Amino acid sequence: MGFVEEQLPVRYLGIPLIGTRMLVRDCNKLVEQVKARVQNWKHRALSFAGRLQLINSVLQSLQVYWCSVLLLPKTTIKDIGKIFKGFLWSGGDLRKGSAKFAWKTMCRPKEEGGLGIRSLQTWNEALLSRQIWRLFTTKDSLWTWGWDGRFPSLQLQPLPLLQTNKDDGIYWQDLNGNQAEFTPTQVWKDIRLVSPGVSWYKVVWFKHNIPSHAFILWLATHDRLMTHERMLIWHNSTIMQCMLCKMVPDSTPHLLFECQYPREVWTIVCTMCNFQTSDINLHHIIANQIPRLQSNHIQIDIERLALAATVYFIWRERNSRHHNGSTIPHAKLAMEVIKTLEARLCGIPLKWSAPMEDLCKRWKIPRPSNWPPPDNINLDT
């Protein structure tokens, strides 16, 4: 017949077929695929936010097929996680001291203070649950026949009779006891380790945020910006003074916004954005924004964008002074923040109203083409 007899292990559809349990060496191909993809991006100038997006959208998708049919060894999961950490924090291989968080913290949803990266071990178990689900929902599949032959007791499991006047069905019950549609995503939500939510989640992560700014603000809320105060945890050295005022030690609370330079920048930005705040502490500023998050008004987005952009540019100015010795006057830095906000607001779809008309004039936003002509506007609307 022209068939060639081979011996296990062999590869079928890209994954190994073996006669024993999965070993680490059987998954080396998957690890190499992830490494190769990271190598293609290693020398590109990517921000933290850009790397995070690539991890969530590209790197994690590489393992979906493997995780759907195989239970990966813990060593393989650890090796892939190390590649993810190295790429996120170092742009390549993980350098000592560069990781700012424990991996399990980053694998929390953003609502719980993490970065929304799914734990590979939990996601592997959730995807494999689909195979168990098929044993009870598709009795006529080849997959079910194979397991029925190996475990005859499965054939003796009757489907429950719920209501005689309706077709029987099997549904997934979530952690709250509610009936839900079975999906691997739903299973993942129910089997993962749940952490307490954070109240500032929507201040940092919202629909119209600027990702690179949101990431730096996320670091700042966790006090993980690499100020000299943080670096002293790993290296004993002389305390470095603030690069902006040269008066007190370099730390996140001082930088945001106890120092005079950032405070003057923030005051100008608040005035230009038409809101006032007397707080000089980042956490107090965030706490004051939280009660207003229920509103969908564009002004709330402006305040959140302004805070994230100000934190981002102040952190960039601090690093520029430290590494390059270059300085920018506080008024000029504030105008950079304002120009960034103007550019972002131009990309947000706006519905016409009289207040929106005023907002477009104030921020120099071009009037959308679907708005009524200015001559036909009733300003009392």
Image (spheres, grey):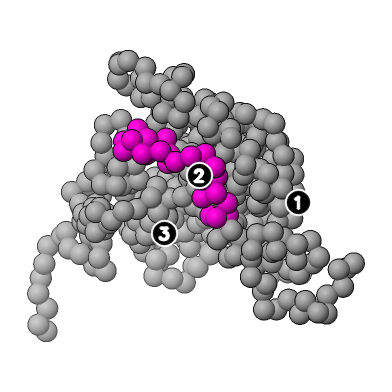
Residue type marked 2: Leu
Q: What x and y, as percent, mark residue 248? A: 46, 18
Q: Main secondary structure of the magenta part?
A: helix
On the question of residue 192 being in view, the answer is no
Query: How would you rate the neighbour count of disc 3 (Cα within 10 Å): few for under 14, some for 14-19, many for 20 or more?
Result: few
Q: CA distance from mark 1 to mark 2?
A: 29 Å
Q: What x and y, as percent, mark residue 247? A: 46, 19
Considering only order in the chain, which callout, 3 or 2, is on the residue closer to the N terminus? 3
Outermost bottom residue: 1
Task: Pick the residue in front: 270 or 184.
Answer: 270
Q: Quadrant of the N terminus?
A: bottom left
Numbered mark located on residue 50 in the image? none
Numbered mark located on residue 295 in the image? 1
Query: How would you rate the neighbour count of disc 2 (Cα within 10 Å): few for under 14, some for 14-19, many for 20 or more?
Result: many
Q: Quadrant of the C terminus?
A: bottom right
- Mark 3 vs mark 1, foreground winner is 1
**3 and 1 marks in contact (CB < 8 Å):** no
Q: Quadrant of residue 9?
A: bottom left
Numbered mark located on residue 57 in the image? 3
**2 and 3 marks in contact (CB < 8 Å):** no
Q: Which residues are magenta?
A: 316-341
Residue identified by numbered label 2: 333
Q: Is residue 46 magenta?
A: no
**1 and 2 marks in contact (CB < 8 Å):** no
Task: Pick the residue in front: 36 or 144.
Answer: 36
Q: Quadrant of residue 39?
A: bottom left
Residue type marked 1: Ser
Considering only order in the chain, which callout, 2 or 1, is on the residue closer to the N terminus? 1
Q: CA distance from mark 3 to mark 1?
A: 30 Å
Give SS at disc 1.
loop
